Amino acid sequence: MIYPNYVDQYGLVNAIHDAGHTLHKLDNDIIVDDLTAVQAIVAAYSPLPLSQNEAKEKIKAASVTKRLEYVTDAPGKDAEYKTKEAEAVQFEADATVGIYMQARATATSETAQQVADVWNAKSLLWRTVGASISSIEDKAVIDLDAETDWTNCVGIAQAAVAAIEAV
């Protein structure tokens, strides 16, 4: 059947296909398999949730990419970082030299204090960077969740990605 005055919206064709209906163009007409069912989909359709989700995914990808500039993504690495941070804090508190600290000091001829200083500086850098990335991402998600106009989602995502990349 011909669908008169069909106006495409972002993601609408996929929603129609996902509902099991066909839609194709023939000359200047839009042909659908079930006009009543497709009209109901069009009437109920909002591109906002899809736009919000796509924007959030772009922001998440940017934050992951930026984080990987500062940390190594390998099994057990996050536990190693936390252990090193805890050893540096413990050393500052009572001069206890932990196993990672001793291993590094032995391998590099650094003093335990030098190792603690390096690890404390790295920890502070990561906490600062991590907090910056997280706050940008959190704010953008709040803005996207509050958005009522799907066309604004791309701009929110672009601004957040640019801010994350600038960290």
Image (cartoon, grey):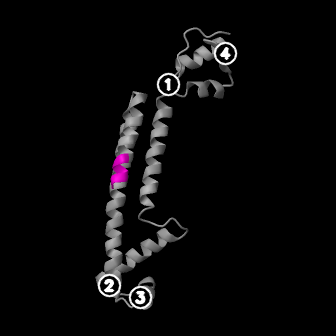
Per the model, the C-alpha gap separating discs 1 and 2 is 58 Å
- Residues in magenta, as a range: 162-167
Which comes sooner in the sequence, label 2 or label 4?
4
Q: Residue at x 45, y 87 (%)?
A: 103
Element marked by disc 2: helix
The amino acid sitting under disc 4 is: Val
The amino acid sitting under disc 1 is: Ser
The amino acid sitting under disc 2 is: Gln
Q: Which residue is mark 2?
A: 114
Quick check: is 66 in the magenta stretch? Answer: no
In the current view of this chain or complex, which residue is farthest to the front?
Answer: 27
Q: Which residue is mark 4?
A: 32
Question: Which label lies toward us, 2 or 3?
Answer: 3
Is 37 or 96 nearer to us in this picture?
37
Q: Position of residue 124 (x, y in %)?
A: 31, 68
Quick check: is 165 in the magenta stretch? Answer: yes
